[in-house]
Image (tube, rainbow, N blue to C red):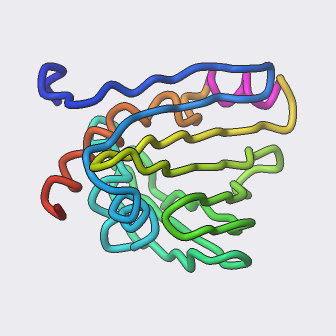
């Protein structure tokens, strides 16, 4: 991805011992950005950063309070697919999604909010870990939103351009 093509910067900040916050403004209304986060066919078009070399095998998302998700990915260096799964704790259409990350015992709770700003949307993603050590370990392994979010969100910007 050419850095000069980035429309809106992604800010990633560790705000406490247990929390990472990722912020970005997207061109498009909150309803459209929310749709890109909650429709499996759209998620598959932006969720996997190209530089990670992973591809979606399957994407199941029942995005409602009490629903669940399961994303399965493949990578050329791995014989086995990788699954990420959890539950939706809270879903407020076009405004907020809260979910668990249950693939490990100390997975974070993720909250993403969508704030309409005219023809733009302020998106704030928060990952709250069970402990300082859990967050430190996630950062060291590259498994937090910090490593993927800038490239993912650039892909989401490209997708949103096709949906407007």
The residue located at (20%, 31%) in the rendering is 7
In the foreground, 150 or 107: 150
The picture places residue 39, in percent across and down from the top left corner, at 40, 73
Q: Position of residue 141 (x, y in %)?
A: 60, 28
**Considering the image in quadrants, where does the C terminus appear?**
bottom left
Q: Toward which corner of the image does residue 66 lie, by quadrant?
A: bottom right
Q: Quadrant of the N terminus?
A: top left
- In the displayed structure, 86 sits above or below 11; it is below
- Compared to 109, does 95 lie above or below? below
Q: Position of residue 46 (x, y in %)?
A: 31, 53
Q: Residue furthest right?
A: 131
- Is 116 left, or right, of 87 in this rendering? left
Q: Residue at x 43, y 62 (%)?
A: 34
Residues in magenta? 133-140
Determine the image quadrant of residue 26. Answer: top left
Left or right: 144 with respect to 50? Answer: right
In the rendered image, which quarter is residue 40 located in? Answer: bottom left
Front residue of 47/118: it is 118
Q: Is residue 82 above or below residue 57?
A: above
Residue in the image at 38% along x and 44% along y: 117
* Residue at the spot 49% in from the left edge and 48% down from the top edge: 115
- Specify whether 5 is left or right of 34: left
In magenta segment, residue 27: no
- x and y percentages locating residue 99 in the rendered image: 68, 59
Count up the numbered dots.
Answer: 0
Q: Is residue 133 left or right of residue 76?
A: right
Q: Main secondary structure of the magenta part?
A: helix
């Amino acid at each position: 991805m050419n850095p000069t093509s980035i429309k809106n910067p992604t800010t990633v900040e560790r705000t406490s011992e247990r929390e990472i916050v990722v912020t970005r403004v997207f061109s498009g209304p909150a309803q459209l950005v929310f749709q890109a986060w909650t429709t499996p066919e759209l998620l598959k078009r932006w969720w996997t950063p190209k530089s990670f070399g992973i591809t979606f095998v399957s994407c199941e998302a029942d995005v409602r309070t009490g629903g669940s998700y399961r994303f399965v990915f493949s990578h050329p260096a791995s014989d086995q697919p990788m699954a990420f799964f959890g539950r939706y704790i809270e879903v407020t259409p076009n405004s907020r999604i809260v979910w668990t990350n249950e693939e490990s015992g100390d997975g974070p709770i993720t909250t993403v909010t969508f704030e309409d700003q005219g023809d733009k949307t302020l998106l704030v993603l928060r990952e709250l870990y069970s402990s300082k050590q859990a967050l430190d370990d996630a950062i060291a392994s590259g498994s937090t939103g910090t490593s993927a979010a800038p490239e993912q969100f650039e892909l989401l910007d490209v997708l949103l351009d096709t949906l407007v």
